[in-house]
Amino acid sequence: MLVPSLLTLVIATAAIWLSAHTKEEVIKVAMASTALIASFLALCFAPWELKLMVIAIPFAIEKLSRISARRSSDF
């Protein structure tokens, strides 16, 4: 169950990247819709470990950026 969930998240990430880096309007809308649907399905059917990881990673990145900002302001 973990592999299909990770595959769906990879598809959603690729669709978000394509949506952000293309100039065609129709492709932007299609990729944004694909990303939204894939993200929703991945989070609905994912095991709780994957859901926890998806929620915890942004918090960890924010905490690390605050620590590095605090260290750079000390010098």
Image: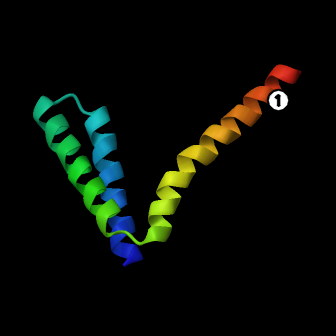
Residue 67: x and y, percent? 75, 35
Foreground residue among 75 and 47 = 47
Q: Residue at x 36, y 59 (%)?
A: 9
Q: Is residue 43 left or right of 72 when viewed as pictured? A: left
Numbered label tally? 1
Residue 48 percent location from the top left of the image: 45, 69
- In the picture as drawn, the residue positioned furthest to the bottom comes out as 1
In the image, residue 24 sits, relative to residue 33, either above or below, namely: above
**Where residue 28 sits: x, y (%)?**
19, 35
Residue under label 1, please give it.
Answer: 71
Q: Residue at x 36, y 58 (%)?
A: 10
Say if 14 sits above or below 74 in the image: below
Res. 3 image quadrant: bottom left
Left or right: residue 55 versus residue 11 is right
Type of the residue with mark 1: Arg
Label 1: element kind: helix
Display coloring: rainbow
Give the image location of residue 37, x and y in percent: 21, 53
Residue 21 placement: quadrant: top left
Q: Is residue 69 left or right of residue 45?
A: right
Classify 58 as above or below 56: above
For the C terminus, give its image quadrant. top right
Q: Residue at x 31, y 34 (%)?
A: 20
In the image, farthest residue toward the left: 26
Classify 58 as above or below 22: below
Residue pictured at 61% horizontal, 38% vertical: 62
17 to the left or right of 63 = left
Dot 1: within a 10 Å radius of its alpha carbon, few (fewer than 14), some, or many (20 or more) residues? few
For the N terminus, give its image quadrant: bottom left
